């Protein structure tokens, strides 16, 4: 599959997740998908993860701010916003995710939160 089609697939699943529609995961992820960040193994683990996120954070919304694809990888910078159902606190989180794609489906991924600024502040 082409890099543009892989990027289009990432956009499509992001739109579905913003609507709290987990069915988009079926088309996007391989059954044996591995999420190295959250230690999720398989599509069903990912479904349970997002169901919990949707329950814990009202007004969950993820915006794609930047995306680059090369080889079998798609790199995406996301901004995720929402409100904690438990505390009422708003979240505004920037992450970078790397997805490895095979035949148009994500087979593994890893996400890194934007922490460099906070890390450097602690060093000073």
Image (tube, rainbow, N blue to C red):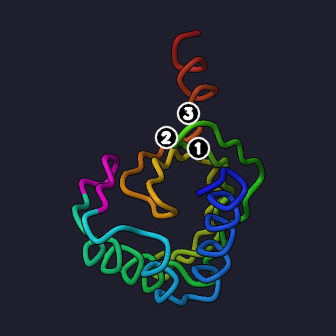
Q: Position of residue 102 (x, y in %)?
A: 44, 54
Q: CA distance from mark 3 to mark 2?
A: 8 Å
Q: CA distance from mark 3 to mark 1?
A: 11 Å
Residue wearing tag 1: 96
Mark sitting on residue 115:
3
Quarter of image, res 11: bottom right
Looking at the rendered image, the quarter that the N terminus falls into is bottom right
Relative placement, left or right, of 111 versus 124 is left
Circles 3 and 2: CB atoms closer than 8 Å: yes
* Nearer to me, 115 or 23: 23
**In the drawing, what numbered circle is on residue 116?**
none
- For mark 2, does the 10 Å Cα neighbourhood hold few (<14), some (14 to 19), or many (20 or more) residues? few
The answer to the question of whether label 1 and label 2 lie on touching residues, with beta carbons closer than 8 A, is: yes
Disc with the residue nearer the chain's start (1 vs 2): 1
The foreground one among 109 and 89 is 109
Secondary structure state at the residue bearing disc 1? strand
Mark toward the viewer: 3 or 1: 1
Q: Position of residue 65 (x, y in %)?
A: 77, 52
The label number, if any, that marks residue 112 in the structure image:
2
Disc 3 secondary structure class:
loop
Image point (52%, 75%), residue name = 84
> Does residue 26 appear to the left or right of 84 in the view shown?
left
48 and 67: which one is in front? 67
What secondary structure is found at the residue carrying circle 2?
A: strand
Q: Is residue 118 above or below residue 41?
A: above
Q: Where's the C terminus, which quadrant? A: top right
Marks 3 and 1: CB-CB under 8 Å? no
Q: Which residues are magenta?
A: 33-39
Lower sequence index among marks 3 and 1: 1
Can you give x and y, in whole percent of width and height, for residue 112 in the image? 49, 40
Q: Nearer the viewer, mark 3 or mark 2?
A: 2
């Amino acid at each position: 599959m082409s890099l543009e089609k892989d990027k289009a697939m990432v956009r499509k699943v992001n739109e579905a997740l913003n609507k709290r529609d987990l069915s988009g995961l079926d088309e996007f992820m391989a059954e044996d998908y591995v999420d190295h960040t959250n230690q999720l193994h398989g599509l069903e683990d990912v479904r349970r993860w997002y169901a919990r996120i949707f329950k814990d954070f009202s007004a969950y919304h993820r915006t794609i701010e930047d995306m680059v694809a090369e080889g079998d990888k798609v790199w995406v910078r996301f901004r995720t916003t929402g409100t904690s159902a438990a505390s009422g606190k708003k979240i505004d989180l920037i992450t970078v995710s790397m997805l490895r794609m095979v035949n148009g489906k994500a087979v593994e991924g890893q996400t890194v939160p934007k922490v460099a600024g906070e890390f450097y502040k602690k060093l000073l």
